[in-house]
Structure formats: C-alpha cells, structure tokens
Amino acid sequence: MPEITYREAINQAIKEEMQRDESVFLMGEEVGQYHGAYKVTQGLMDSFGRDRVIDTPISESGFAGLGVGAAMMGLRPIVEFMTWSFSFVAFDQIINNAANMRYMSGGLINVPIVFRGPANGGVNVGATHSHTPENFYAHIPGLKVICPANAYDAKGLMKMAIRDNDPVCILENTILYNQTAEVPEEEYLIPFGEADIKRSGSDISLIAHGRSVITALEAADKLQAEHNINAEVVDLRCLRPLDEKTILESVKKTNRVVYVEENKPFCGTGAQIACLIQEKAFDHLDAEIKRVCTLDAPQIYSMPREKDQLPTADRVVETALTIL
Amino acid sequence: MSHNPAQASINTLLSQEEKIHLYREMVRIRRFEERSVRSYQQGHIGGFCHVYNGQEAVAAGTISVLGPDDHIITAYRDHAHALMVGMDMNSLMAELYGKETGCSKGKGGSMHFFDPSKNFWGGHGIVGGQTPLGAGLAFALKYQGKKGACLTYLGDGAVNQGPFYEALNLASLWNLPLIYIIENNQYSMGTSQERGCAGDTLAGRGSGFGIYNEVIEEGNDVYTIRERTSEALQRAYEEQRPSILEIKTYRYRGHSMSDPDKTYRSKEEIEEYKKTSDPIDRFQEQLVGESVLSVEQAEAINKEAKEEAERAVEFAEQSDFPTKEAIQQDIFWETDNPEQGSSQGTFFFN
Ligand SMILES: Cc1ncc(C[n+]2csc(CCOP(=O)(O)OP(=O)(O)O)c2C)c(N)n1
Ligand SMILES: [Mg+2]
C-alpha cells in the first residue's frame, strides 16, 4: 500500500468524489488558483476548472450560506474554511440554516453539504486562530461532526461525508497534514459512527479524537515502556453520530478512562463522554474518569507556553498514573 | 491638475524637524519589518507574521495628522500602526518573540499588538472583525462629547466581510466620527482585487449609505495622504460624519511569512513598483528637493533605525517567556482583581 500524507488523502477523496458526481463542487478562499492556504486542494482547479473549484472572496457567511442554498437544490457543495476559527463569522448559516432546515421543513428538504478545514492549536497563531469548535458543532442536532486522526481515516471519512445527505463538519488539523499513513489504492469508505481501536490494551482506556489520538498513542507507548501498563487507545473519529458501543466495551474491559482532547475542558467533548460512561457503565468503573484537555484559557501565542497549554503525552501519562 | 498636496496647509505647517521626523518614522517601520523578517526566518517568531513593507506612507500619513482625542484600530498587519502611535520597538519585537516584556505580554503575537494608552486599540486577526469595533470607538467618543475621530483600517479583501456593511449603516445612520481607511494593496492573500471584489471602487461601496468616499491613487505620497486624512478628520469633528478613504498601495512581501508568493503575481510587478513607486524613496526625494534633508542625513537615519531594530532584537532575546501561571491570567478582570470582585463560583476547569 502506498504511504500518502493526510493532505494528499483529503485531496484524493475530493478528487475521486468530484469525478464520480458532477453535482459536487468545491468552494472557499484560495482553494483554486493558490491551491489552498495549506495546499490541500492542490491541482483541483486544473482538473475540474473554475466552475467547480471556486475561489471566493473573504465572505464566509455569504459563501457558507450560498452553499446551503445550493445544497437545498440538490448540489453537493464542499465548503472550505481556511480554518474553522473563521467559521465563527458563518455560525448562523451553519447552525440556523444548514442544521435546522430539514427539521423546520418537516423533512421536505435535506442539505447535503460538507464544511471542512483545519481546526487546531499548536502553531502559535494566538487566540483568534486556534479554535477547536468540534464540541460547538456536535452540540447541534442536525450536524454530523468528524475529526480524522490519520490519512487513512481522513480519506474514507471525507468520501463518506461528500456522499452523505446531511450537513457534515470535518475538522482537520494543520499539524497532521504532513503525517503519512498507508492508504489503499482501491476505493474504500468509512461509515460514520464507528470508533476505531488504534491500540488494543487491557489496563486503561485512553479515549480521544483528532490529533489527541496521536498524543494518546504516544502516551500509551510511554505507559508501556516506563510503567508496564497496557493502555487501549480508542479513536472516536466521529463525535456525532457517536459509537457508544465501542466506548462502553473498552471501559468494560479496562475499567479506567482518561479522555484526551484539544478542546477546552468546560462543556468539552470529554464532558459528554464522561457522562455517557457513568450513565451506562457505572459499575464497571474502578476510578473516576479523568480528562486531559487544553488548559482553560484563550490560546496563548508565546511558543513554549502554548506547548504547555496543549495536552501532551506526559500530561496524559501523569494523569493516567493517578487512577492506576 | 496643478493641485500640489505638498502645498496643503497641513503640510506647509510642518517644520523641517517634523518633516525629518516623519521620514524617520517611515524608515523605522521599514527597518523594523526587515529585522522581523530575519528573526522569523531564524525561527524566533512563531505563527503568522504579516509585514508592512511598501505601505509605509499609509500608516505614516494617516496617523501623523491625528490629535490627542483621535483613536485607531486595525487588522493583523499592525506593526506600522503600532510604531506610528509611538509604541516602543522593544515591546513590539518582544511580543513577536513571545516574551513577557512584549506589548501584550507575549499572549497576542504579531497580529495582536495593543496600547490603549496611546489610543491604539489593536491589531485584530479575524478579517473585518475590527470594522464594527471602530464604529464603537467612534460612538464612545461622540457619547463622551470629545472632539475626536476613530481611524479604522481594513484591507481590500476585508471589504467583502458582512460586518463592514452593518457598521457602515450604523456609522451613517448615527452620524459617527469614523474614518475607514481601506489599505488597498491590490491583493487579499493570493486574490487580486478583480478576482475578489465586484463593482468599481471599494470606497464607492459607501455611496449606498450616503457616506463620503474617495480613492487616493497617490497612496505612496505621504503629503497627499496627510491632506486627505485631515479633511476627513474635519468632516468627523465638525459634521460628525463618517468617511471612507481607499488608499492605493502595494505590499512587497508575501501575504504573511508563510506565503511563498508564487501563484498570483510576477516578480517583475513587485520590482517595478519598488523601482518607480517606493513611498520612502519618494518622500526622501521630496525632502531632498526641498533642501530639508541631505542624502547623507537620510543614510544616517537609516543606519540609526537599523541599530534601533537590532537593539530591539537584543532586548527581546534577553527577555523571559511568560510564566506558566500567566496562561490563566488576564482572562477575566475579576480573577485578576480578586479583592474587588463579587462573583462566587468556579471560573476555570482544568
Ligand atoms: C474571517 C477570516 N477569514 C479568513 C482569514 C484568513 N485571512 C487572513 S488575512 C486574509 C487576506 C486579507 O486581505 P486584505 O483584507 O486585502 O488585507 P492585507 O492582508 O492585504 O493587508 C485572509 C484570507 C481571516 N483571518 N479571517
Ligand atoms: Mg490587501
């Protein structure tokens, strides 16, 4: 199997789906002539022309809403946010329009749109540019929310999202764009709502989504090497729909949980997962559920301090040891 | 035709020293930016860093005519505005280095310089986000009965953000002493004006709101910019009416330090502008022509500015990074001033 980057995986997914379905088009700032601010859409304008790969002005509210309207008519827009931090100026279009349209029309309308782009800290761009709003969007019934952690998942989930008949938010990660993984040449899709055991273990469950899965895997290696503890790493992949079954099975096996995420802790994804576990697997817990999140503050610019603010493998190990 | 902005009273009133000072400010901006670029390339500066080279006449011209109750707010390309309001190079360079001695204690970075004590309400990272804030600053001035205006800067790309239009309507409806300065450097990242903006001029978008607007073609001429800005200020002071000035300019470097600048314009285009239209060269020639400045003096000013930027780097290097505790300070006024607060309950959730 060829090794490709996370960036290439997304590029391939978009390309294949655009080849397959004429109604799919891509829209966003600098996606065409500039090949994408992070080069994810490299070459797509050359392949599909300016009618299907559309450079927009800096008008997120306008083009996100336009995308929703086009999707109501049966087109399948892929709307790129240069980063998800900029989706906040389009919040109303995503939440009030994309997410609610089907419900408010009593099921007469559906909105097959993909909103995608990176959402992460760790690159010293400060508070306005470092948001990880997957929990905001997962909060909204009507939106599906996906956070791929590697190239394989990114491709399979992206293709699925483009074929999905509901609005899907895919939150990528600029730090992962250069990471490689083996990705088959033949076509594959990854259904939503299937978590993935990225490392099988018996002593503790490290549950995570997005880049924090990589942090959890690092922590699991350290726990094994330095403390002889065999951790299981569960990658949610999708926040909504959520794979409750895999989470609960893992808890029943290990009886201990640390949730790792780049979200800020208050009302973060980990809070929801902890609630689920205590509700449905209370008797299987041998310790309180712990979380390792980004420190509860706006993102700091200063380089060494942003490292401290983000979840690290060491912090995961330390936290895990407190409940073992 | 024969109108000569150098002869406008706002410019003829300048003493020789004041003219040389203005020249020095433009040079300091250029040297600071060049030094920032080098530090960025050496890995001392993180994230996004947007430099101002080529646009110096805009910040220098507009800010040099402001009075004590005038305020400014801008976007992320904010180093020049910060220098022009009189912020110390050391504190700016330290901010770029993420140090606690930086103007925002290393918390904001390049895009988020602030100094309210100098009527500078920042650097703002979200495109267009500052445009209603500027209206709010102007609203406050009027509310407080001050004879002041707010200069609100935005780019040729930012004009396509919705909040700008809501702010324009409010500014006109409520007669706010507000001046929008559109720094039209012809590109919004890799998108040229033709590819991103419908209609004729960007300033002209104010017409629908009944807002005075004009395009300043000679955006590399500091005299012209001073003249037109002071007219807009009079409009704000005397009539409480907003204005839009679209100033044509050009950026020499990529959009930010991470822009390879390969896909949307030619090297020749950049070189041509530098050769024929550089704002600092132009002002230097004018001053030499007026016998205000000699070429030797100009060289000395350049050398001093270089040294000042170098000292700022030393200062930044020798400063400390913020402490870990600082990560959770400066979030709520109340948690920073616990004796004066009245809230109960938990603020932070680690
Ligand atoms: C809402 C939002 N969308 C996108 C961006 C990314 N972005 C930052 S600057 C920029 C281009 C802005 O160009 P312009 O307004 O012309 O200002 P200039 O950079 O030329 O000074 C873009 C797209 C952002 N910061 N905020
Ligand atoms: Mg511009």
Image (cartoon, coloured by chain):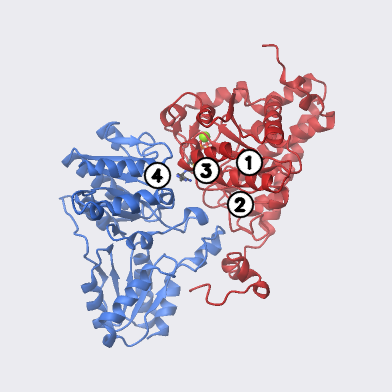
Check disc 3 and report the residue beneath it.
B257
Residue at horizontal 29 percent and vertical 37 percent from the top:
A44
At label 4, which amino acid type do we have? Answer: Ser
In the depicted structure, whether residue A229 falls above or below residue A138: below
**To which quarter of the image does residue A270 belong?**
bottom left
Which residue, as the protein is rendered here, is positioned at the far front?
Answer: B173
Q: Residue at 58% x, 49% y: name it.
A: B110
Which chain is mark 2 on? B
Q: Name the residue under label 1.
A: B33
User: Pointer 4 indicates a residue of which chain?
Assistant: A
Q: Are marks 3 and 4 in contact (CB under 8 Å)?
A: no
Residue A221 shows in the view: no
How far, Cα to Cα, is label 3 from label 4?
27 Å
The chain in red: B
Q: Is mark 3 on a helix, strand or loop?
A: loop
Ligand 1 closer than 8 Å to label 3 CB: no
Disc 3 is attached to a residue of which chain? B
Q: Mark 1 Cα within 10 Å, few/some/many (few <14, many 20+)?
A: many
* Residue corresponding to mark 4: A61
Secondary structure of the residue carrying numbered label 4: helix
Of the numbered discs 1 and 3, the one sitting upstream in the chain is 1
Is tag 3's residue or tag 2's residue first in the polypeptide sequence?
Answer: 2
Q: Which of marks 2 and 1 is nearer the N terminus?
A: 1
Residue labelled with disc 2: B96
